[in-house]
Image (cartoon, rainbow, N blue to C red):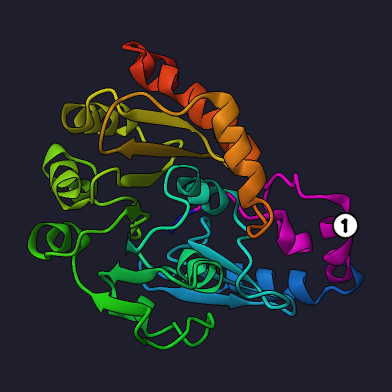
Amino acid sequence: MRAASQPEDTAVIACGGTDRRTEQERHSDRSMDHSHASFDAYMKFLAGPCPEGTPVVLETEHALSLHFDLLATQSFMSRRDPDRLVLGYTRTMMGFLLLQPAPTRISMIGLGGGSLAKYCYRHLPDTRIVAIEIDPGVIALRDTFHIPPDDERLEVICADGAEYVKDYDARPDVILVDGFLAHGMPAQLGNAAFYSACHARLADGGVLVANFVDDDPHIPYYLEEARSVFGESLSIFMAEDSCNYTLFAWKGAPGLPSRDRLLARARVLATTHPLNLRGAARRLKQGVGLASDWIFGQTLTG
């Protein structure tokens, strides 16, 4: 996982994140402002040796975050509610619920601090979740981030995600791609061969969701590679509260349900999911036009 900036939940250690939560949610976290403990912990972290690709945990009184370097947050966990999706892009990725509200199986490429795995484990009790993580050092931190142990519903596998989708026979309804190393997203998670393997692996009507950092110059390339496999069944848009882009690609006809139908689904899902799925529904529809715009690459990078 990777976020372009710190979430404002970190309060005094925030580095430019945008907070669009409700006033009640913001108020619940203001206790972090009442001491310098978080600030002191963050300054100590900055003064320490550069992780240089090794996963490092920054611990404060109210939060834990995972880092591969001193600038970007790979994952973030609130101590008060370890299963809550604090980073906006993770909430946006859960927009797959608009297309697959009750998936039988989810494959996650990239574990990080387990934010998405924990959320799905808690809120989708009938779903089998398999997380594929290439870095054993990240997996070693699963207890630190309160990731449940493996059981009949959750499995964490140490493997290359690109190889996993080619070699395993599982038929997930959803594939979530959030795999990052210290240098950024591995090239093998953004080419046509990978998207083709995902398309073949997905169950009928299945959904692929991928997270991109907005300053990645290769996003237009990823989009073209995805289009070569999924055709016009694509949507890409800016994630909630962040500087990340989210790609949705689905197996089947290019058209999405109507905006009104997606909003109706979002209203139903809101009874069990503390997510802004209405906003995701609107952006999902708008993102179809952006994905089909042939000058998207110039618009994004120009």
Give the magenta part as a residue range: 3-32
- Identify whether 137 is placed above or below 116: below
Amino acid under disc 1: Gln
In what quadrant of the picture does the C terminus appear?
top left
Residue at position x 53%, y 80% from top?
A: 145
Residue 296 pos. (x, y %): 37, 17
Find out whether residue 10 is within the magenta segment: yes
* Relative depth, front residue between 84 and 45: 84
Residue 241 in the magenta stretch? The answer is no
| Position in image of residue 15 (x %, y %) | 67, 52
For disc 1, the marked residue is: 24
**Which residue is pictured at 22% across the width and 25% down the height?**
231
Residue 46 in the image: state x and y as whole percent.
59, 67
In the depicted view, which residue is nearer to us: 127 or 109? 127
Q: How many marks?
A: 1
Q: Position of residue 163 (x, y in %)?
A: 12, 61
Task: Judge from the rendering whether residue 173 lies leftward or rightward of residue 41; answer left or right.
Answer: left
Q: How many C-alpha atoms fall within 10 Å of the one at disc 1: few (<14), some, or many (≥20)?
A: few
Label 1's element?
helix
Horizontally, residue 120 falls left or right of residue 160, namely: right
Q: Residue at x 75, y 72 (%)?
A: 38
Image quarter of the N terminus: bottom left
Residue at image position (82%, 58%) is: 25
**Residue 40 visible in the current orientation:** yes
Report if residue 276 is visible in the image. no
Vertical placement of 238 versus 203: above or below? above
Q: Nearer the viewer, residue 294 or 254?
A: 254
